[in-house]
């Protein structure tokens, strides 16, 4: 898949990262409540720059396996987080996804929309059969999001991550292509094209 990727949902536009997003990304990358359940953070400025450079570089890989996108509000264009999906290999049949929003955007269903958009992109554009995600067992908000988008809990991976001085356990969720119902999940785009429809535009 060539060109820039855009995923549109009712309230969001997920678009490619740009270098001038660095400051906005850094704001949430140093927020302890945001990175608490994440495998990174608090970021140094260099780490945030490196994240953006990796996201930009992933666009040029052929075939492209990793789609790390900026989550922006459709109405204002403000960047409120990041969301990504990554195919396991060039067959594109399995992929994992994740998301992270700045704190003042929480609790409005926006992560659910972003996750729904990624899943739609994974099944429709990448042709995935299985999409999976993990969340820290203490991350109740994220577990809600994964359940709301129709993912099923497969189990708990005990002490799978050493993070900031502690072992963490993760819940593993997945959804298969024949379980995905376009428009059946709250918060997804409902106009015209199916929810999670990604428009692929040439750069
Ligand atoms: C996890 C995260 C993405 C959720 O974003 P969000 O936009 O608030 O998510 P949504 O509003 O779509 O859904 C959150 C759900 O959790 C529920 N929730 C909110 N606070 C909660 C709490 N303290 N305890 C339990 N559930 C809670 C909400 O009610 C909502 O469910 P509902 O729609 O059924 O009411 C956001 O908190 C975040 O970015 N956290 C930091 C990074 C992170 O943890 N990323 C995920 C890694 S796996």
Image (tube, rainbow, N blue to C red):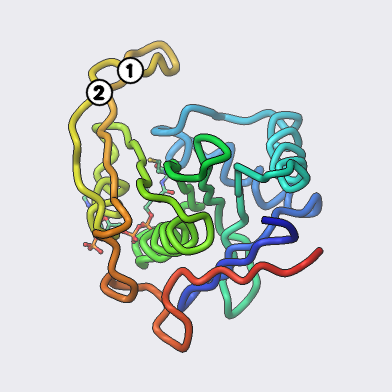
Residue 106, located in which quarter of the rendered image?
Answer: bottom left
Task: Name the residue tied to disc 2.
Answer: 157
Q: How many marks?
A: 2
Where in the figure is residue 117, as x and y percent of width and height? 45, 64
Where in the figure is residue 41, as x and y percent of width and height? 55, 29
Question: Going 56% across and 67% down the picture, which residue do you hit?
Answer: 7
| Residue at the front extreme of this rendering | 91
Looking at the image, is 74 positioned above or below residue 136? below
Where in the figure is residue 31, as x and y percent of width and height? 52, 40
Q: Secondary structure at mark 2?
A: strand
Let me know if residue 81 appears in the view.
Answer: yes
Question: Going 49% across and 61% down the picture, which residue do you hit?
Answer: 121
Along the viewing direction, whichever of 203 and 20 lies nearer the viewer: 203
Task: Name the residue tied to disc 1.
Answer: 160
Within 10 angstroms of label 2, few (less than 14), some, or many (20 or more) residues? some
Where in the figure is residue 192, as x and y percent of width and height? 47, 88
Would the CB of label 1 be found within 8 Å of ligand 1? no
Q: In the image, 119: left or right of 150?
A: right
Q: Secondary structure at mark 1?
A: strand
Looking at the rendering, in which quadrant would you find the C terminus?
bottom right
Residue 145, located in which quarter of the rendered image?
Answer: bottom left
Let me know if residue 105 appears in the view.
Answer: no
Q: Dots 1 and 2: beta carbons under 8 Å?
A: yes
Looking at the rendering, in which quadrant would you find the N terminus?
bottom right
| Residue at the bottom extreme of this rendering | 192
Looking at the image, is 10 positioned above or below residue 116? below
């Amino acid at each position: 898949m060539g060109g820039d990727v855009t995923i549109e949902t009712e309230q969001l536009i997920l678009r490619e990262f740009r270098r001038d997003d660095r400051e906005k990304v850094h704001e949430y990358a140093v927020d302890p409540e945001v990175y608490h359940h994440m495998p990174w953070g608090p970021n140094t400025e260099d780490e945030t720059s490196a994240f953006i450079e990796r996201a930009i570089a992933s666009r040029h890989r052929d075939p492209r396996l990793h789609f790390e996108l900026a989550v922006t509000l459709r109405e204002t264009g403000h960047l409120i987080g990041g969301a990504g999906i990554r195919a396991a290999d060039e067959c594109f049949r399995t992929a994992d996804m994740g998301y992270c929003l700045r704190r003042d955007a929480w609790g409005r269903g926006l992560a659910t929309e972003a996750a729904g958009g990624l899943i739609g992109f994974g099944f429709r554009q990448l042709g995935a059969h299985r999409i999976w995600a993990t969340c820290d067992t203490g991350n109740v908000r994220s577990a809600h999001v994964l359940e709301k988008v129709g993912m099923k809990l497969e189990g708990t991976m005990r002490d799978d991550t050493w993070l900031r001085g502690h072992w963490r356990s993760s819940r593993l969720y997945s959804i298969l292509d024949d379980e995905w119902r376009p428009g059946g999940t709250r918060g997804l785009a409902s106009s015209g094209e199916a929810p999670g429809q990604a428009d692929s535009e040439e750069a």
